[in-house]
Amino acid sequence: MASVKLSESKIEELRAICRQFNNEKGELINVLHGAQQLFGYLPAEVQEVVAEELNVSLAHVYGVVTFYSFFSMLPKGKHPISICMGTACYVRGAEKVLDEFKRLLKVKVGETTPDGKFSLSCLRCVGACGLAPVVTIGERVYGRVSAEDVKKILGEY
């Protein structure tokens, strides 16, 4: 994984997030949420600063980042796409919808398009099972999506 050079101002913003939570070890998840909002993802360099500020091991920070699927160590696209693979969505064709996004964007799950516009991921449940299959792009939710709808949806961006 390529190294990321953090500017002094960004490092100071990250330290301020840690201070917001009194640099307490027990606030690691809250600090990581704040850090991911600031950077868009959690590269190793960000994790190192958090570990140092909260006085926890880098291995512990890494363990939390990799355990929770909300956190990402890779940059997300400007428009992050998530396809729900919960039971209701899956049985109503979410896999075909996912395959169509992969085909049109020419990326695999977990990847970002070369132009940085879209990233593709799956999640377990959006909580909108009556609208299955469900796709989210950023904060926007699309319900009853079919493979045929994917091209039109991408066209909105």
Image (cartoon, rainbow, N blue to C red):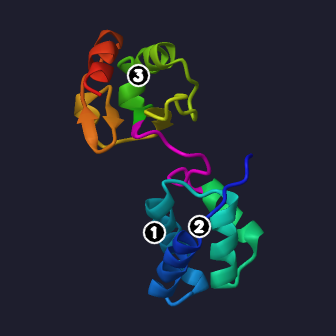
User: Closer to the N terminus: mark 1 or mark 2?
Assistant: 2
The amino acid type, in three-letter code, at marker 2 is: Ser
What residue do we see at 41% from left, 40% from top? 78
**Mark 1 is on which residue type?**
Gly
Q: Residue 10 carries which label?
A: none
The residue tagged with tag 3: helix, strand or loop? helix
Q: Which of marks 2 and 3 is nearer the N terminus?
A: 2
Q: Which amino acid does label 3 sit on?
A: Ala
- The question of residue 74 being in magenta is answered with yes
Label 1 packing within 10 angstroms: few (<14), some (14-19), many (20+):
some
Which quadrant: the C terminus? top left
Residue visible at 44% across and 19% down?
101
Q: Residue 7 carries which label?
A: 2
- In whole angstroms, how far apart are the C-alphas of marks 1 and 2? 17 Å
Residue 79 colored in magenta in the image: yes
C-alpha separation, residue under disc 2 versus residue under disc 3 = 41 Å
Q: Residue at x 57, y 35 (%)?
A: 110
